[in-house]
Image (cartoon, grey):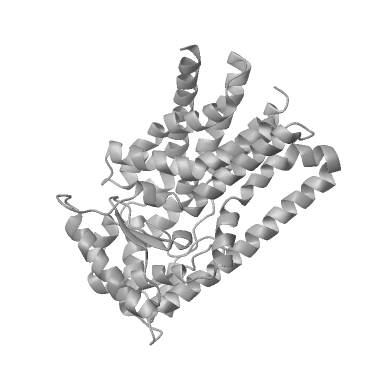
Amino acid sequence: MQVIFQLLSLGAFTAVVLYLAMYLSLIPWRRSAGRHWTERARLLWPARRTVFAATLAGAMVALLWGRMSFGWLPPTGVIIGGALMGSPGLYPYIREIEPRYRFLPWLRETAWTLLVRAAPLMVAVTLMATMPDVMGPPDVWLAASGFLLSLLLASGIWLPMVMSRKKGEDPLAPVQARLDRIAEEASEGAGVVPRHAWLADSPLANAVAFPVIRSVAFTSRTMELLDDEECLDVMRHELAHLREPLVVGVLRVLSSVSYFVIVLVRPVLYAWGGLGLMALLLGFLLFQRLGGIVQRRMELRADVAAAGSDGESPSYARALEKLYEAGKLPAVMPGNSMVHPHLYDRMIAAGVTPDYPRPAPASRMSAVAWVCLLITIVAAVSLFYV
């Protein structure tokens, strides 16, 4: 019971950190009420990036505080549990950004997101903090197990066990039937038939391809926003990803879990000093760069497939704009290293010039996010001495 109480206390602390961080980072977006959607999305983007940084900062500080106040606590449980229990601190702002959300559906989506995306990273951070200077066989086995689990989650091969088609009396069954029809029509010219075409009930507008398991997923919001022609173009884009070479699929999965090299920080620093640590960092950055270049090329290739043989598709341009506007995503992202090209450029490539001037690029992160990352680094380093 004492451990549960301690974890709840640390979760409450993380919730307060998230609440305050989001309150501060959303101030510029709130002040932009009434302006064009591209400007509002541009101001919202850095606040979105604050979520992850603040979650990590809150969880890491909670772990440090727990170690100092309560003695030993299970680090993985503190970080993952703190992030999950602290996530309700985000809910008021999630509702402010997307009023369609309700608490239980949002909590379910958040739990899945933490499990699939955040949990492996937090496990890696925990292993980094607890890894000895010299790794013995048990340490190698533990690190390898965490890495393999992260690969499993990133590959999506577990999705058929938790996803199902909407059918029978389900209110979304007619929408599922429409999605099936669109997938069948798109596959005739794409040269690939998806094993699964899932419909996810979510207020977020999104469509995703899972190349490893040759499947696609559309959200109910996407199906609500787009007409059949627009859905067909988006489906062609996603099916193009299913035709990617196997090596690209492997690179995608490895790139998504390459952060696991942080587990080796202490052993590398002990064995080779600062030079070894710099080599490890350089290798990570180069691999990330390679993965980003390949994935961006695949996105350009998929956009060409969506536009069709003519090379232009006004319906695809409209679909992209609707999805970005509904998702409040910037028309011009920060820098040119994002996996997806800028919406503005994608629309022009599809044959449509937007009826607004090219927006300024969004900032990478808010000042609050940078502070949170600094706190995370300080807390992680402090764990070595506690």
Seen at 67% across and 37% down, the residue is 141
Q: Position of residue 352 (x, y in %)?
A: 36, 79
Q: Is residue 165 above or below residue 313?
A: above
26 relative to 384 in the view: left or right? left
Q: Residue furthest bottom?
A: 310
The mark total stands at 0
**For residue 95, what is the image quadrant?**
top left
Q: Position of residue 277 (x, y in %)?
A: 78, 45
Does residue 50 appear anywhere in the picture? no
Seen at 39% across and 40% down, the residue is 110
**For residue 351, what is the image quadrant?**
bottom left
Seen at 84% across and 47% down, the residue is 275
* Residue placed most toward the observer, 70 or 191: 191
* Residue placed most toward the observer, 111 or 351: 111
Q: Residue furthest left?
A: 169
Q: Is residue 160 above or below residue 61?
A: below
Q: Position of residue 100 (x, y in %)?
A: 26, 47
Question: Quadrant where the C terminus lies?
Answer: top right
183 relative to 269 in the view: left or right? left
Q: Is residue 273 above or below residue 336?
A: above
Q: Position of residue 230 (x, y in %)?
A: 29, 71
Seen at 69% across and 60% down, the residue is 286
Does residue 188 appear anywhere in the picture? yes
